[in-house]
């Protein structure tokens, strides 16, 4: 080994030792650390002054601080909630939890529907059909230029203009539309339905595992086992067999007019429906443009290559173009999901009791303005960070991995 010589190409790759930090203004690292300490100190002094000044003003006005008010009886009437609520017994804390659930309900449903609608409109804008392309273009250019508040007020006025329950519009005498909301049949949940749902969830897991096995098999042998027969068996046949084996209950609670209102069934309130429709239609316009730009970012040669293989344009779009376009679509899509979640706070204009509305009522009744505003900020910050974390995880999962 004594006769070997070092490769000259590796000499420059050696790790250069770091220089020791010198407490001198001429050292750039010392200057950077100094200014960071100064800025952090200034921010800390500002925060200390604001907190102290706020505490002095609250004490001078004999306003109590803290979150003890969450344990007091609320007395706030709430029109719709996902969990039981009695204003004469339940606390402000439970009322605020209902507000969070109402916000999450409209945000989650809105994200799903806006994604579906926006994707379809974005693809429609690229259609070779002149009429479809122009209709989707008018939809996008019109709705995204009208403020969301005005759209919410428009939809709310439209729903309030529906007839009273006695003259409600109906579809087959099972679905009724009136100025008090939309009445739909409600499934009477039985034990068999619970087991069928569990079987469906097990089928989802089984389908995912089989799809993973099929992908690994394709990478190893070049042949991919069929996934759809297994998915059909696990997602449809298995739950139906379980449901039928347990008696196949089909109880349905139908809405029936009694007096001046309907009884039975499930109600979609005008406020919730207005907020959902407004958020979905408005956000979908931006998602459509993101999808359109993502598809256009894929090279035209990908379409030509798919066509050369004998695939239809729809198959090329689903199997070749969209998977590549996702890498362009997902990052800006995150911003639209965040906007939809935060825009749900406009529910206060139409009377939908989300976290913003209930928190405002709470701080007006208790006088705990700082705590109420901090609660609202914490809720929206948590929702936004959760959406960002999930979308960043998904974006990293679909990103190209260089070998």
Image (cartoon, grey):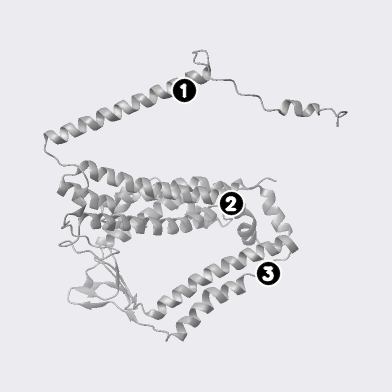
User: Marks 2/1: CA distance?
Assistant: 38 Å
Q: What residue is shown at x 50% (from left), y 82% (from top)?
A: 241
As displayed, is residue 14 above or below residue 236?
above
Image check: 304 left or right of 334? right
| Cβ–Cβ under 8 Å for marks 1 and 3 | no
Q: Label 3, on which residue?
A: 225
* Residue position marked by numbered label 1 in the rendering: 33
- Spatial distance from mark 1 to mark 3, Cα to Cα? 59 Å
Query: At which x and y percent is residue 240?
Result: 49, 80
Q: Secondary structure at mark 2?
A: helix
Q: CA distance from mark 2 to mark 3?
A: 22 Å
Which tag is nearer the camera, tag 1 or tag 3? 1
Counting residues from the start of the chain, the first of labels 1 and 3 encountered is: 1
Residue 89 image offset from top left, x and y in percent: 16, 62
- Labels 2 and 1 touching (C-beta < 8 A): no
Task: Out of 166 and 332, give the one closest to the viewer.
Answer: 332
How many numbered badges does the structure rendering display?
A: 3
- Asked if residue 150 shows in the view, the reply is no
Residue under label 2, please give it: 398
Residue 315: x, y in percent?
Answer: 64, 61
The answer to whether residue 198 shows anywhere in this view is yes
98 left or right of 15? left
Dot 1: what SS? Answer: helix
The foreground one among 83 and 29 is: 29
**Circle nearer the N terminus (2, 3):** 3
């Amino acid at each position: 080994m004594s006769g070997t010589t070092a490769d000259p190409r590796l000499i420059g790759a050696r790790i250069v030792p770091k220089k020791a930090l010198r407490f001198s203004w001429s050292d750039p690292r010392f200057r950077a650390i100094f200014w960071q300490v100064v800025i952090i100190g200034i921010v800390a002094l500002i925060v200390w002054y604001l907190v102290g000044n706020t505490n002095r003003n609250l004490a001078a006005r004999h306003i109590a601080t803290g979150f003890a008010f969450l344990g007091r009886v609320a007395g706030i009437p709430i029109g719709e909630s996902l969990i039981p609520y009695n204003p004469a017994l339940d606390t402000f804390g439970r009322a605020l939890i209902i507000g969070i659930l109402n916000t999450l309900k409209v945000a989650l449903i809105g994200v799903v529907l806006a994604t579906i609608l926006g994707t379809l409109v974005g693809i429609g804008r690229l259609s070779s059909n002149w009429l479809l392309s122009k209709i989707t273009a008018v939809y996008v250019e019109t709705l995204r230029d009208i403020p969301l508040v005005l759209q919410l007020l428009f939809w709310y006025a439209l729903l309030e203009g529906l007839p009273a329950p006695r003259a409600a519009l109906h579809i087959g005498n099972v679905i009724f539309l009136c100025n008090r909301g939309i009445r739909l049949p409600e499934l009477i949940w039985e034990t068999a339905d619970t087991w069928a749902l569990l079987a469906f969830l097990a089928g989802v897991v089984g389908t995912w595992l089989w799809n993973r096995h099929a992908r690994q098999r394709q990478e190893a042998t070049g042949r991919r086992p069929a996934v759809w027969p297994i998915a059909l068996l696990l997602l449809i046949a298995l739950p139906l067999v379980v449901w039928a084996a347990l008696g196949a209950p089909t109880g349905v609670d139908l809405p029936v007019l009694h007096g001046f209102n309907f009884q039975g069934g499930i109600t979609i309130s005008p406020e919730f429906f207005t907020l959902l429709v407004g958020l979905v239609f408005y956000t979908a316009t931006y998602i459509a443009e993101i999808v359109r730009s993502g598809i256009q970012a894929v090279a035209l040669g990908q379409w030509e290559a798919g066509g050369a293989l004998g695939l239809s344009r729809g198959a090329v779009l689903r199997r070749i173009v969209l998977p590549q376009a996702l890498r362009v679509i997902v990052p800006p899509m995150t911003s639209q999901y965040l906007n939809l979640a935060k825009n749900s706070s406009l529910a206060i204009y139409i009377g939908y009791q989300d976290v913003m509305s209930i928190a405002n009522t709470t701080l007006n009744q208790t006088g705990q303005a700082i705590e109420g505003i901090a609660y609202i900020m914490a809720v929206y910050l948590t929702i936004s960070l959760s959406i960002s974390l999930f979308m960043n995880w998904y974006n990293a999962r679909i990103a190209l991995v260089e070998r």
